[in-house]
């Protein structure tokens, strides 16, 4: 278990990385060509270096980051504990400047996310969760304990979804729920955090993601009392027997489809 002093230091690292991103985010992207991703790349790398340097000063554990993911499986497969980092999740949100991008730092222990920080610098929202210790949200200096909320009989399903066209798989999932559903649009790993804080009931992810996209937010969800489970059959996604999403179990860092639920 991480003590409070260490948790606070990791939260501070996420905020420092957010500051690096904001320096670049606040520039006028109009000066770049439409297909020029250099401000995005620059922000990603600045946050990456800030986080890696910060974690190395605190711990000798290995680090897997989206920006340094070319670690051979022969080495990675021996890891019992490691830091899993996505320095900037939500590239579309960054480029569109809608603020819904995040800095993500997770601690993985035996394949399980046991601690996570998700920081959205534009929104000034930080989600922190440690398994067995609960989860909380920091916003404008206020700390609020968070937990998922079960759907009540008279409620409409609140489902985290995409702003763009819904896939046939998502439609099949919505049909399997029965009753009306309301889609809540959100970018990046904040989608999982909406379930963790009870702002949505479910988040079905029936499309590709990588392990660094989800590790920190899964730790927040599970610390808050929610679940992140593998979806093998869309029509039966909410099965009580569904396995929890796990990490560093194979050479590929791609996640299977999954469901975030209360």
Image: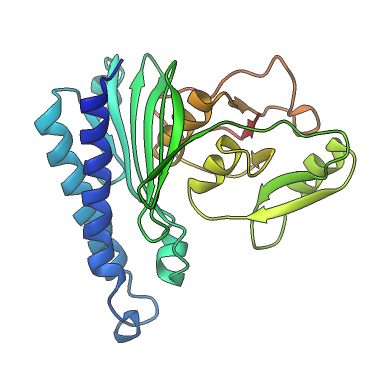
For the residue pair 189 and 165, the one nearer the viewer reads as 189
For the residue pair 143 and 159, the one nearer the viewer reads as 143
Image quadrant assignment for residue 78: top left
Q: Is 259 left or right of 93, judged from the image as shown?
A: right
Residue at 23% in and 31% down: 63
In the rendering, at what x and y percent does residue 241 appear?
A: 70, 14
Q: Is 228 left or right of 155, judged from the image as shown?
A: left
User: Can residue 31 be seen by looking at this rendering?
Assistant: yes
Residue 112 versus residue 137 in the image, above or below: above
- Furthest-front residue in this view: 142
Residue 132 versus residue 233 in the image, above or below: above
Q: Please identify the quadrant where the C terminus is shown.
A: top right
In the rendering, at what x and y percent does residue 138 appear?
A: 40, 43
In the rendering, at what x and y percent does residue 155 appear?
A: 83, 41
User: Can residue 68 be seen by looking at this rendering?
Assistant: no
- Furthest-bottom residue in this view: 31
In the rendering, at what x and y percent does residue 53 appear?
A: 12, 40
Residue at 23% in and 58% down: 19
Residue at 31% in and 18% down: 77
Colour approach in the figure: rainbow
Q: Please identify the quadrant where the N terminus is shown.
A: top left
Image quadrant assignment for residue 212: top left
Residue 172 versus residue 163 in the image, above or below: above
Residue 119 versus residue 220 in the image, above or below: below
Residue at 30% in and 25% down: 73
């Amino acid at each position: 278990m991480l003590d409070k002093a260490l948790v606070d230091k990791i939260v501070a690292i996420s905020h420092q990385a957010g500051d690096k991103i904001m320096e670049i985010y606040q520039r006028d992207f109009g000066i770049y060509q439409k297909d020029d991703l250099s401000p995005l790349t620059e922000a990603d790398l600045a946050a990456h270096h800030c986080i890696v340097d910060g974690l190395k000063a605190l711990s000798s554990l290995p680090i897997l980051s989206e920006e340094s993911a070319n670690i051979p499986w022969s080495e990675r497969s021996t890891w019992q504990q490691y830091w899993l980092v996505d320095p900037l999740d939500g590239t579309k949100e960054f480029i569109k400047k809608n603020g819904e991008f995040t800095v993500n730092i997770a601690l993985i222990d035996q394949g399980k996310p046991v601690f996570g920080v998700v920081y959205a610098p534009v929104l000034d929202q930080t989600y922190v969760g440690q398994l067995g210790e609960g989860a909380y949200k920091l916003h404008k200096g206020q700390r609020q304990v968070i937990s998922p909320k079960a759907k009540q009989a008279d409620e409409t399903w609140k489902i985290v979804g995409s702003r763009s066209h819904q896939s046939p798989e998502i439609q099949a999932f919505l049909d399997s729920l029965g009753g009306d559903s309301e889609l809540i649009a959100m970018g990046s790993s904040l989608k999982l955090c909406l379930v963790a804080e009870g702002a949505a009931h479910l988040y079905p992810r029936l499309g590709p993601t990588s392990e660094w996209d989800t590790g920190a937010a899964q730790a927040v969800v599970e610390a808050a009392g929610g679940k992140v489970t593998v979806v093998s059959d869309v029509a039966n996604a909410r099965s009580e027997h569904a396995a929890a999403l796990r990490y560093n179990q194979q050479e590929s860092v791609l996640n299977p489809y999954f469901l975030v639920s209360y």
